């Protein structure tokens, strides 16, 4: 598969971009995870408690790691943080784009029932944000 040059790339990391509020939320979530682990450790066998706590930790990990967005001629690619998770969405899977308060919702075609709407957050950099809007306008009517 041929790789095309990216027309736009940006990173969104709510934990880092949220300032003190983001770190306070992260601390509260980690404290809650610790309490849940203690409850599990005292009520279940230790191995089961460790496995369940690990599963819970992996479930919330994407909210603490950065997301990398890439837009090129083939479509949109999203890569999530530490765990190398990457997903490509071709342009032909989407019917339109709706402007949201802090980003854009890409709406799927009715013929693609397994694909849900995809949210693209607004880049923090104003130049990148303007470029994103122009790229989306090339492919979809914005409403």
Image: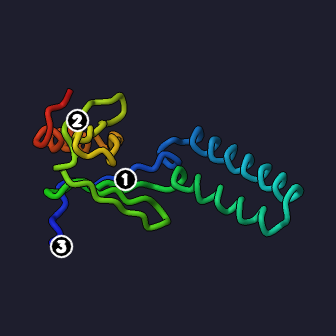
Q: Earlier in the sequence, mark 1 or mark 2?
A: 1
Left or right, residue 80 beside residue 136? right
Which quadrant is the N terminus positioned in?
A: bottom left
Q: Residue drawn 35% across and 28% down?
A: 101
Dot 1: what SS?
Answer: strand
Q: Residue furthest left?
A: 138
The local crowd at label 3, few if under 14, some if 14 to 19, many if 20 or more residues have their Cα within 10 Å, is few
**Residue ID for mark 1:** 11
Residues at marks 1 and 3, CA–CA distance in whole angstroms: 24 Å
Q: Residue drawn 89% across and 57% down?
A: 42
**Residue ID for mark 3:** 1
Residues at marks 2 and 3, CA–CA distance in whole angstroms: 27 Å
Asked whether the residues under the numbered discs 1 and 2 touch, taking CB atoms below 8 Å apart as contact, a structural biologist would say no
Specify the label residue 127 is tagged with.
none
The image shows residue 92 at horizontal and vertical percentages of 16, 49
Colouring scheme applied when the structure was drawn: rainbow
The image shows residue 87 at horizontal and vertical percentages of 34, 59
Which quadrant holds residue 45? bottom right
Q: Earlier in the sequence, mark 1 or mark 3?
A: 3
**Nearer to us: label 1 or label 3:** 3
**Residue ID for mark 2:** 97
**Nearer to us: label 1 or label 2:** 2
Dot 2: what SS?
Answer: strand
- Front residue (pair 10, 103): 103
The local crowd at label 1, few if under 14, some if 14 to 19, many if 20 or more residues have their Cα within 10 Å, is some
Which quadrant holds residue 20? top right
Residue 88 vs 15, above or below: the answer is below
Q: Residue drawn 57% across and 42% down?
A: 22
The local crowd at label 2, few if under 14, some if 14 to 19, many if 20 or more residues have their Cα within 10 Å, is many
Which quadrant is the C terminus positioned in?
A: top left
């Amino acid at each position: 598969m041929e790789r095309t040059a990216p027309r736009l790339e940006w990173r969104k990391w709510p934990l880092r971009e949220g300032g003190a509020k983001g770190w306070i939320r992260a601390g509260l979530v980690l404290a809650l995870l610790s309490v849940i682990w203690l409850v599990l450790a005292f009520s279940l066998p230790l191995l089961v408690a460790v496995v369940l706590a690990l599963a819970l930790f992996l479930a919330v990990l994407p909210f603490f790691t950065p997301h990398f967005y890439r837009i090129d001629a083939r479509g949109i690619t999203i890569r999530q943080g530490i765990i190398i998770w990457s997903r490509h969405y071709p342009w032909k899977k989407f019917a339109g784009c709706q402007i949201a308060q802090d980003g854009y919702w890409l709406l799927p075609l009715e013929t693609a029932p397994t694909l849900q709407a995809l949210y693209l957050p607004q880049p923090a950099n104003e130049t990148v944000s303007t470029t994103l809007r122009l790229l989306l306008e090339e492919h979809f009517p914005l409403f």
